[in-house]
Amino acid sequence: MQNQKLYDNLLKLNLYAFFLAFLVVMPVIVPFFQAKGLSLSEVFSLQGIFGISLICFDLPAGYIADYLGRKKMMIIGSVITAIGYSILSISETFLHFAIFEIVVGLGLSFQSGCDVAILYNSIEKLSLVGSKTKFLGSRIVSNTTGEGIASLLGGALVGISLSLPAQINALTAWLPVFIACTIYDPPGQNLPKGSHLQNFRNISKALFGHSRLLSFVILNFIFYSFATYCAIWSLQAYWKERDISVQHFGYLWAANSFTIALISFFAHRIEKKIGSAKVIILVSILPVVGYLGMGFLGGLLGLISTVAFPICRGLNQVIFQEAINSRVPAEIRATANSIASL
């Protein structure tokens, strides 16, 4: 009975990842903000507010998930995130949008790392250890495919109204809540209900005082996630400066998402083919190529150079995230993933 629940988790977690990223408003969110009277500087200030909310909430939320249970935090986080996108659909001012960013930051912090922790714990309970990278890649493929399909829908809806994607997103954001409620959280893999201080010491030792390789893996995952995250939020302004129609943003964003999905799907094969060291070198070079291309090349070549970012993101999310989750104890996986995503 338990094994069936664990096998069901593999499908449900993919569905959860798909709808978590099914953000219809995302490919046109910068023009959406600007249509509400915000300057590009204010748009990036909003992302700064979102980032600060993650810094404040991500680590404690990950610890709470490991302490009280990942499924509980996934449900709570999904509800808070859905409320955030409902706020977005009726927002009109910078203050309203700032509240949206803070609420979504809190919601995502509660969810952060929980699904990956449950995925790895389920795989270990089922003794499917050799397939970890494959299942993680499948989860990222589901996530980015959801984002890509939502991008196509968002691009089509914006032709009707620039506000319509946000209104639809306010509805679709509730879908992960229902899926999270059906997920099975394997028992016996939470932090001990003892001293919080001792738990913090054990977490610190496990992540940064036990293996230099693990410490470097975590730092690299943080750095290259940050490098590609900054680029993603620059793309819509970059497209707009090149007089690309807002209606085409959905197609371009979808192409970006599907590229991540494709690379994530083949990431474990790429690593086996060329070796881990060469993959890490490739991941380190790609953001440099992307930023130089955006800065110095125009027209089609400039657009082509931005493909470096989703390739980097696809490799980074699978290779480094797998390296982290396969090296940390099961009871602190949500905390470890929260630190990495923070």
Image (cartoon, rainbow, N blue to C red):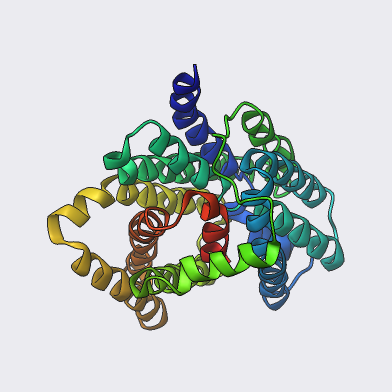
Q: Observer-nearest residue: 179 or 6?
A: 6
Q: Observer-nearest residue: 313 or 9?
A: 9
Q: Image quarter for residue 49?
A: bottom right
* 316 versus 295 height, above or below: above
Q: Is residue 266 left or right of residue 123?
A: left
Identified at 60% across, 53% down, the residue is 112
Q: In this view of the protein, can residue 233 be seen by the observer?
A: no
* 230 versus 91 height, above or below: below
Q: Position of residue 326 (x, y in %)?
A: 37, 53
Q: In this view of the protein, can residue 258 be seen by the observer?
A: yes
Q: Image quarter for residue 102?
A: bottom right
Identified at 57% across, 60% down, the residue is 338
Q: Is residue 272 left or right of residue 198?
A: left
Q: Observer-nearest residue: 140 or 229?
A: 140
Identified at 46% across, 40% down, the residue is 121
Residue at the outermost left position:
273
Q: Observer-nearest residue: 12 or 294?
A: 12
Residue at the outermost bottom position:
296
Q: Position of residue 184 (x, y in %)?
A: 57, 29
Q: Quadrant of the C terminus?
A: bottom right
Count all numbered tags in the image, as a single digit. Answer: 0
Q: Position of residue 73 (x, y in %)?
A: 68, 45
Q: Position of residue 336 (x, y in %)?
A: 52, 60
Identified at 65% across, 62% down, the residue is 58
Q: Is residue 113 left or right of residue 289?
A: right
Q: Is residue 223 left or right of residue 92?
A: left
* 52 versus 137 height, above or below: below
